[in-house]
Every structure is written in structure tokens, then in C-alpha cells.
Image (cartoon, coloured by chain):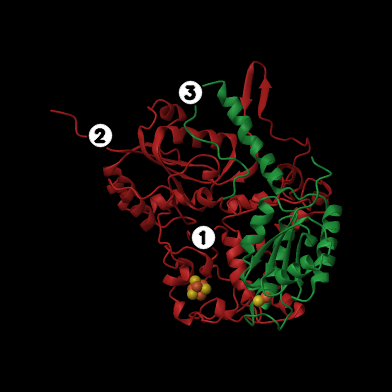
Amino acid sequence: MSEAREPRIVGFFCSWCTYTAADLAGVSRMKYAPNIRVIRVMCSGRIDPQFVLKAFACGADGVLIGGCHPGDCHYIEGNYKCLRRFRLLTRLLRDLGIEEGRCRLEWISAAEGDKVRTVVNDMAARLRALGPLDAPGRFRDWGKDLEELEHAMAGEGPGESSRAIEPARNE
Amino acid sequence: MPDPPAKPKVALYWCASCGGCEEAVVDLAEGVLSVLNAVDIVFWPVAMDFKRRDVEALADGAIRAALLNGAIRTSEQEEMARLLRRKSQVVVAFGACAQLGGVPSLANQFDREQILDYIYAQSPTVVNDQGARPVSAYREGDRVATLPEFWRTTRALDQVIEVDYYVPGCPPTPKLLGQALATLLSDELPPKGTVLAPDTALCEECPRKDSKPEDLSVKTFKRPHLTPMDAALCFLAQGIVCMGPATRSGCEGLCIQGAMPCTGCFGPTSRVRDQGAKALSALASSVEGKEDREIESALAGIPDPVGTFYRYGLAKSLLRGKVGHLCSDRPESIKTGSMESRL
Ligand code: SF4
Ligand code: FES
């Protein structure tokens, strides 16, 4: 479809470390790939796997999770919980057809502005190589059945009181 | 003498389902008699001789409530769902398949072509020397025989028509069915979209609840058929995957009482959008280790996360099935037997 489309990355960054590091990268005027949209969370342990799935369902090509280094979590255990979820989530995603590199976990402390730059650049390059994930496109493709039937039925009978749900709808 | 007031009309229909939901109606046992007294069943193909044209002959909105079970996979199922929607004041998605996609929606892990290829060619028990495949219309002489279209994906009922209420379960219990019918025939209908079951997690009503550790810490997940199980201890405390924490209550712990862990058929509570992700989150975060290797080996006891966490709800999950490029559109994935290894 849109071969030249730039990858879209959704970032979930822990407020105490990676988010601050991204801030630091900003005030240090570091330049990095503009492909990421960052959502700040209080701790990587707050990142519900539903957030990641929702990002992909809404059209993200990659999801970057940033948390405090092991041992440094402000809430002691949050990043370990995050890591454990991430390990299983990676496998779930693979089985759902989503390559490993599309969901990435990095420990980035508040001082590592440069690491934010390297990681985001690297991820954007890898996602460019992988190509778009385009889950909404897949939903649209699935939705064609309903459209076909609607067209077929439009010729006959009274108007449908029922409503076909938009195929890409994912509340 | 004036006619007695007409009884409310009720329709029951099945789509992509196993028949267990129909069984639930029969399981009302003698309760079924009072249902038959209270309502006028105008359509129930499994048990009574009605035809589609009988439904078509009814005025729009003439049916008080239609209970549909099963997921939607074919054009015929979709047409029937739409027809019943038009003829009914209230449509109920009855059972896990209608509510969430159910077990049939695990087929969303495969493409239509892959499925047809497996069923008509690859499956070890298939003898099909001519390589015959179903076609939607077949002409012989001046007669045309038709078959429904097999859609690209399996859907829950509300991904096709508007649904008013949901009755969860694989299948729903007779008790829930009885309550649902009473609710539907009463004058006070709950808000549209209500799931007609309690809105708490199964652990709340589980007979093993008292032994569920407050701070769960699992060394390694074990598979139920490969491990001796304690008859009274919370399954998670034994390291056996139990979907209880991420599943709606209302079954009264039937599987637990039968010494099997919950597999999640009641779907999520209203506060959860994606049951599988929620279960994954709860279970994975309770693993003990802090290093990749420890964590991996603990999680090795969950070899098939999609089949474990989305057993009844893949169609209604956030991603609805296999979405990515690792999939399917590539025929070699069939030839390497990837489908077979999953079955
Ligand atoms: S996890 Fe399972 S066994 Fe344990 S209390 Fe919850 S439902 Fe019962
Ligand atoms: S506070 Fe940063 S990961 Fe927990």
C-alpha cells in the first residue's frame, strides 16, 4: 500500500528514568528519528500488555517500553514485573504474527539521553526494514466480506435495520 | 370471549457453535416447561420444525427476544443474524462463541486458504484425489446448488449486528439462562450491552479462594495433565495456569469443583478490554525470577499463550487474530506443516 510510509513507534516511558532521559536528550539538542510518540507512565510496571496490543491494533509498527535499570525501580519491583510480562508478551505477539523486533524493552536511566537517541534510531531503522505492520489494514481486509454481503443484499429486500460494525473498530 | 393475551415470541438460533448452548436449554430440565408456558417459541431449528421463511413472514420487531449462540463464519450465519436482528426487539449473544468468538475464533490464527487447504487436502484423514473444493454455486443441468460463503475471519455476534445483551459461558449454565429469560420477559430491562452475569472475577466465588496467596509467587508453571494436583489448593498456588483472576464469575466454579482449573469461558469483567492480555499480565508478573533465563524457564509451562489466554475470545481480543507478516499469506507455512504442529 504505502511502501514509503515511515514507521510509527509508540513509546511507553517510565517517568522516573526513560522519560527524563528523553527530556535530557531534548534539552541537549540531540537529534533522533522523529518516528516515536511517547506516553509517560509512572513506572514500567504500570504498562498493561493491553496498552501494547492496543497500540498495534491502532496502527503502530513498533512499541518501545522504557524502564529503570534492574534494581533501580522507584517502586522496587515494577521493572521486574514489566520484564516478566514482556517475555511472555513477546511470545504471544510472535504467535499473532508480530515479529520480535516490533516490541522492545530497554532499561534507560535518567542520565542516558544518548541511549534514547541510539535506541530510537536503531528501532526506526529495523522497523523500516521490516515494513509496516498495518493491523488496521488487515482488519479492513477482513471487513470486505461484510461489505460484499451488504452489496449483494442491497439489491433485494427492505433496508437493513442492523448495522455492520466498522471492521477496524477496536474501542 | 376475547383471545388470551399473546405470549411473547422467542427465537433461538445457532451459528458456528458445537451445540453445547442448545444443550444448556435442554438442561433447564423440567424448568423448560415453565419457559414453554411463558413464551411462544417461533424459531428453534435444533428442536422444532421451522424454516427461514417462517421468520421472514413475521413483522419486523415481532419477536420479543432472539437468543443466538455461535460465532459468525459464513454468509448464511450472517444473513440469519441480520434477519433475526430485524425481526426482534432484543438480541442476546448467548454463550462464549456469540459473545467473544469462542473456540471457533481460534481459527483466526489461520487464513481462509490455509484452513480450506488443511481440511480438503493436508489433513491425514482426508481422501480427496480429485482435489475437490467447495464452491459457492454448482450447476448441474438447469439446477444450481449453492453453499454459503466461508468468510475471511470468525466474528463475535456484535462484530456483525447490534447486540443488546450477553449471556456468557461455554455453555451458559441453566441457572444463568433461567435468570436471563426472566429478565428479558420482565418490564425492566437492564441497560443495553449488559452481560447477564455477576461483574466480579471468578476467584471471588471460587471454593479454593481461601488458599489463593495474596502475594503470588510462581517458581514454574506446570501443565495440568503432567502434574499431580492438590484437590483443595488454589491452582495458581500450585503453579497451574488458572484463568480465574481474569475471568468473570457466574459459573459457580464448575470446573474448579470438577478439579480442573478455569480456562476462561466467561470472558472478562466489564473493567477489562482484552481478557488474554489481562491474564497474561497477572500470571507472568507473578513469576519469581529476575533474570531472563529464570523467567523463561518458569514461563515455559505456558507453551501456547494464544490458545491458553484467548481460548474463548480471540475474535473479540484487541488484535482479533493473527495480524502480522509472520503469517499465513505465504503458502510455505502450510507446507512446512506449521498448522499440523499446532493441532
Ligand atoms: S486462581 Fe483459580 S483456583 Fe485460585 S482462587 Fe482463582 S479461580 Fe480459584
Ligand atoms: S519507576 Fe521506573 S521502572 Fe519502576
Q: CA distance from mark 2 to mark 3?
A: 27 Å
Q: Position of residue B6 (x, y in %)?
A: 25, 34
Could you say which disc has been placed on residue A158 in the image? 3
Q: In the rendered image of this protein, which colour is used for chain A? A: green
Residue B296 x %, y %: 73, 75
- In the picture, the quarter occupied by the N terminus of chain A is top right
Q: Are marks 1 and 3 in contact (CB under 8 Å)?
A: no
Note whether ligand 1 is within 8 Å of mark 2: no
Q: Amino acid at mark 1?
A: Pro
Query: Which color is chain B depicted in?
Result: red
Q: Residues within 10 Å of mark 1 (few under 14, many from 20)?
A: many
Tell me the chain of label 2: B
Return the chain for callout 3.
Answer: A
Q: For mark 1, name the chain.
A: B
Both marks 2 and 3 on one chain: no
- Residue A21 in the image, given as x and y percentages of width and height: 75, 71
Badge 1 marks a residue whose secondary structure is loop
> According to the image, label 2 marks what residue?
B6
Does residue B249 appear to the left or right of B114 in the view shown? left
